[in-house]
Every structure is written in C-alpha cells, then in structure tokens.
Image (cartoon, rainbow, N blue to C red):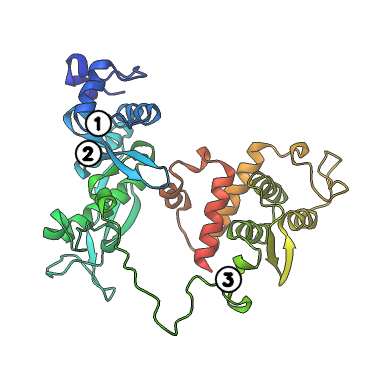
Amino acid sequence: MSAEITKAGGALAIRADQTAWTPEQAAVLQQSGIDNEVTSAELSSFLHLCQRTQLDPFSRQIYLIGRYDRKAGRKVFTPQTSIDGYRVTAHRAASKAGHALGYEDTLWCDESGQWRDVWLSDKPPAAAKVVVVRNGQRFPAVAKYAEYVQRGKEDKPIGLWGKMPATMTAKCAEALALRMAFPHDLAGVYTAEEMAQADNPAPERHLRKVQPGEGDPWATPPEDARTPAMHGRSQPAQDIADVAAQTSNRAAVQGLYRQANTDGLLAETVKVDRELLELGAYLIARGQQLSTPPPPTGDEPSEDGVVDVDAVDVPEDDEHAAAVAELRAFAAENGIPDIDAAAYPHLGAPLDDVAPAAIRALTAQLRVSAA
C-alpha cells in the first residue's frame, strides 16, 4: 500500500496494518460529527475503506455521514467523499496498474431525449452522461437529474443543485462511471453529490375527510379487483418460480429450492402456465424435468412431498457458477454488453464475491424489469 495516507503524521496517521481506531483518532472523528450512535461495525468498515482508498478522513478527503433510517430505527452512517476524492483514487489506481485513464466528452440530455455536448439552458438538464475510458475499455454511465437533485422544504432545488444543476448532474454521472471502471477501489463509498438527495425532506401527507357518498378507502376490495398477491401469491415466491421456469440448469433449481426453504416460501402459491401451484412442489417437479434423477443422495421427495434440502449435494461452487451463468445468459439475450460491470452497483461487489441467492435475486429483478 502507498504511504500517502500515512503522511498525515503524528498520532492521526493511519497505518496499513491498523485494525482499529486509536483513542486519538476516535476523538477527532467524534469532533467531525460521528456521534455515539455509530456502531463498531460501521467504524471498522470505515477504517478498512480509508486504508483501501488511501483517502485521509482527517484531511476531509473522506468522512462518515449519519442519517436516520426508518427501517433500521436508528441513525445509519454512510461513507462519503467528493468527486475530487474519486478522481484521486481512480488516477492512483490506474497509475498503479499501468493503465491509461481518460474521458469522452460529457453529454447532457433535455426532456425530449436530445443529447448536447454543452448545456446552455437555464433549466436543469434531464440527465447527464459520462464515459470513463480505462485502458481502452469504455465505462458509460447516465445520471438523471430528478434522481439526485437536492430539494428543500418547498420541493425546490437548494445549494449547488439550485445554482449549477448541469455541473452537479454531470458529477453524479462521473461518479457512477468511475465506480464501474474501478469497482475494487471505489466500492462502498459514494460522493457527496450523489448522496445530497438523501437529505431531502419526506413528502408531506395531506389528510382530508371522506366526503358524503364516497366509499370507504380502507374497505376490502372486491375479489375481481384484487392483485395477484392478494390471491395468496407473494411476489418473492413468484419471482423464484419465474426464474425456475426459464433456467435450464438443474443445480440452479436446487439452489432456488434452498432459497425458498430458507425464506419460508415453499408453501406459497405461484402461477405457472396458468395453473396455481405450491412453490415447493413446482420446484421439485421442475428439477425432475431438467434431468434424469441422480443417484440416491437424499434428493428424493419424502412421503409428504418435501425434499430433504440438507441432504442435497449441491457444491457451493456449482451453485454459484449456475447463478452467474444464468445472469450472463440473460444479459446476452437482452444485449447487456458487460453484465459484470453493470451488476456491480446493485450487488456492491464483484460477481465472484456475491452469494448465489443475491445473484439470482438480481436476475429475477432484471427479468421483471425487462418484461
């Protein structure tokens, strides 16, 4: 590791072999806004990130920002840096690998879908596109203004988003492109430009009285108006069934059975070829369709029709390979040129380091989006 991060000197210098924050470092971090609600896991992850990116938190090159998370029921701390910090990390990584690093011209898009290489309108652009070129390979990324703009209480753009919307949108697109080009160096850290929208106020909810003659909005809808999920089907179970119907790999179906069993979805009702079936029974039947039964390994259904999943001999490597193969097959069918790079922002790690269940979940999500 480069010694640049250790040049801060004194008691605040971060060592490459350091595994925990020193009392002196922790005191300075607390003064920078990291309060007692931060968890030890978040602090340890932040230290590792500083070492990996070689960015110095004591020089404000990288920092932890706490925001209240309703689902977690507490303040959650997220690492952030500036676009300048991203550029420093990218140039350092490219130089270390002996790779050339460059950019194509930044483009902005108006509401009609017309792309321009300069933005002169007083109105914000609809999107910006940045292409990072690393060692001859292109990494294009598009950021939509509406997804990243920081708004105030009156739903109006504030701060730099109100003054320089084209520049801020381009910075978000550049961050996306750099993260695709340098996934190992920039994973787990986002730019302040990208995260500004996280501080947007929650939309106001206006209540009104039910007017005479109006129906009860909370009443149970008639049977014909119910969604598929209200007929006893859950979307997660249906997604698993859809993936099983489209795969030709028996090991992948076994992996889906494991996932459904872990999530308690085997008894859920799914729709397959216009028929309603229990997910567990369908996965067993689907697995039997794909190949002849293997030698006895405990994979046969018991008298009650349930497979002894713990006895199924599906090596983790085979299961992972099947999940990756399925994702890449989908990418090839739908014209996605580099699924490894495209999947990284969603999975947060390279495909080789992601669990099979997460890869299958992403594949299912992509199939639903493409439908």
User: What residue is at 29 percent from the left and 63 percent from the top?
Assistant: 204
Foreground of the two, 247 or 11 = 11
Question: In the picture, residue 134 is in which quadrant?
Answer: top left
**Rendered-image quadrant of the N terminus:** top left
Is mark 1 in CB contact (under 8 Å) with mark 2? Answer: yes
**Where is residue 90 shown, x and y percent of the image?**
27, 39
Which residue was labeled with disc 1?
A: 55
Mark closer to the observer (2, 3): 3
Q: Which residue occupies the extreme front position in the image?
A: 212
**Toward the viewer: 345 or 238?**
238
Dot 2 falls on a residue whose secondary structure is: helix
Q: Secondary structure at mark 3?
A: loop
Residue 3 visible in this rendered orientation of the protein: no
Residue 17: image quadrant is top left
Mark 1: few/some/many CA within 10 Å (<14, 14-19, 20+): many
- Give the distance between the C-alpha atoms of the residues marked 1 and 2, in whole angstroms: 7 Å
- Residue placed under numbered mark 3 in the picture: 227
* Residue plotted at (17% across, 57% down): 161
Residue type beneath disc 2:
Gly
Rendering coords of residue 182 (x, y %): 35, 41
- Quote the CA–CA distance across marks 2 and 3: 47 Å
Amino acid found under the numbered disc labelled 1: Leu
Residue designated by label 2? 85
Left or right, residue 257 beside residue 239: right
Q: With 281 as the anchor, is 229 left or right in this view?
A: left
Q: Provide the secondary structure element on which disc 1 rests.
A: loop
Q: Please, what is the three-letter code of the amino acid marked with disc 3?
A: Thr
- For label 2, the crowd category at 10 Å Cα-Cα, with few meaning under 14, some 14 to 19 and many 20 or more, is some
